[in-house]
Image: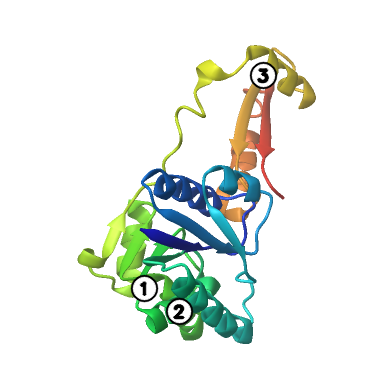
């Protein structure tokens, strides 16, 4: 199959990481893996995984740009004989939805997290992520949220929990000298307890809760150091 994934940019994040992993899997299965995106520092990694990047301004939330992107995506679908277009964010999902309607390509979405819905307009805007021929939720929590918030039936909803490449993150592959060097760079002494929270810096990821928790145990564990490693 020829798969076109659509994502705003290719920098840090779970959606970006999954985009590359899916591109690698599609290519390994003998298909073509195209990605429409504004791009970012993971472009080389996508290329190494076998993916093909098409630069488009799909990060924009401007209604006119979203409408123009639908035409651009439709041209891509026809030119590359795309079987399925897979949207991973709301603004590009609207473009992908209209492009799929024009071309007959299958339309799939992945619901990566909860969205604020403080008004009817915002709830309608969010609903595009639940309009896929198949809607993928990346956890059972998100699956329940999608079913409750948008009424997506079970036969259109698939829960596929996020995974991790255990070969890439195998502790046995980590050189202890590299660990010591990194601790020294972070100014963590050998006798100190290092608590590492690797995640993009956002209220969604829990850094504030980690800091509050550390404060609660400061009297009992004064030698603990919390390191929040991630994009600002």
Q: How is the image coloured?
A: rainbow
Label 3: few (<14), some (14–19) or many (≥20) C-alpha neighbours in 10 Å: few
The answer to whether residue 5 is visible is yes
Label 2: few (<14), some (14–19) or many (≥20) C-alpha neighbours in 10 Å: many
Using the image, tell me which numbered label, if any, was put on residue 75: none
In x, y percent, where is residue 135?
34, 64
According to the picture, the residue beneath numbered tag 3 turns out to be 179
**First-in-chain label (3 vs 1):** 1
Q: Nearer the viewer, residue 134 or 111?
A: 134
Relative to 214, is 131 on the left or the right?
left
As displayed, is residue 77 above or below residue 220?
below
Relative to 108, is 16 on the left or the right?
right
**First-in-chain label (2 vs 1):** 2
Q: Secondary structure at mark 2?
A: helix
In x, y percent, where is residue 149?
36, 71
Q: Nearer the viewer, mark 3 or mark 1?
A: 1
Q: Could you tell me how far apart the alpha carbons at marks 3 and 2 are, in whole angstroms?
A: 48 Å
As displayed, is residue 4 above or below residue 138?
below
Using the image, tell me which numbered label, if any, was put on residue 105: 1
In x, y percent, where is residue 82?
41, 67
Q: Could you tell me how far apart the alpha carbons at marks 2 and 1 are, in whole angstroms?
A: 8 Å
Q: Residue furthest left?
A: 155
According to the picture, the residue beneath numbered tag 2 turns out to be 99
Label 1: few (<14), some (14–19) or many (≥20) C-alpha neighbours in 10 Å: many
> Is the Cβ of the residue at disc 2 closer than 8 Å to that at disc 1?
yes
Q: Nearer the viewer, residue 228 or 28?
A: 28
In x, y percent, where is residue 161?
36, 47
Q: Could you tell me how far apart the alpha carbons at marks 3 and 1 are, in whole angstroms?
A: 48 Å
Residue name at image x 44 percent, y 50 percent: 22
Quadrant housing residue 67: bottom right
Q: Secondary structure at mark 1?
A: loop
Relative to 38, is 123 on the left or the right?
left
């Amino acid at each position: 199959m020829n798969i076109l994934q659509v994502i705003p940019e290719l920098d840090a994040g779970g959606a970006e990481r999954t985009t590359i992993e899916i591109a690698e899997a599609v290519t390994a299965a003998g298909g073509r893996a195209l990605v429409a995106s504004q791009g970012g520092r993971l472009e080389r990694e996508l290329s190494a995984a076998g993916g093909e990047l098409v630069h488009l301004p799909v990060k924009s939330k401007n209604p006119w740009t979203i409408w123009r992107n639908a035409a651009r995506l439709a041209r891509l679908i026809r030119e590359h004989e795309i079987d399925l277009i897979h949207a991973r964010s709301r603004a590009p999902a609207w473009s992908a939805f209209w492009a799929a309607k024009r071309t007959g390509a299958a339309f799939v979405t992945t619901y990566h997290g909860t969205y604020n819905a403080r008004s009817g307009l915002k709830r309608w805007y969010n609903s595009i992520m639940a309009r896929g021929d198949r809607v993928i939720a990346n956890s059972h929590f998100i699956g329940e949220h999608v079913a409750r918030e948008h009424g997506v039936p079970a036969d259109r909803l698939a829960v596929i929990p996020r995974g991790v490449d255990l070969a890439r993150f195998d502790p046995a592959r980590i050189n202890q000298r590299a660990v010591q060097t990194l601790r020294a760079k972070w100014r963590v002494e050998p006798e100190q307890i290092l608590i590492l929270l690797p995640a993009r810096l956002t209220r969604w990821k829990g850094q504030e809760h980690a800091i509050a928790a550390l404060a609660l145990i400061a009297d009992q564990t004064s030698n603990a150091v919390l390191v929040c490693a991630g994009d600002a």
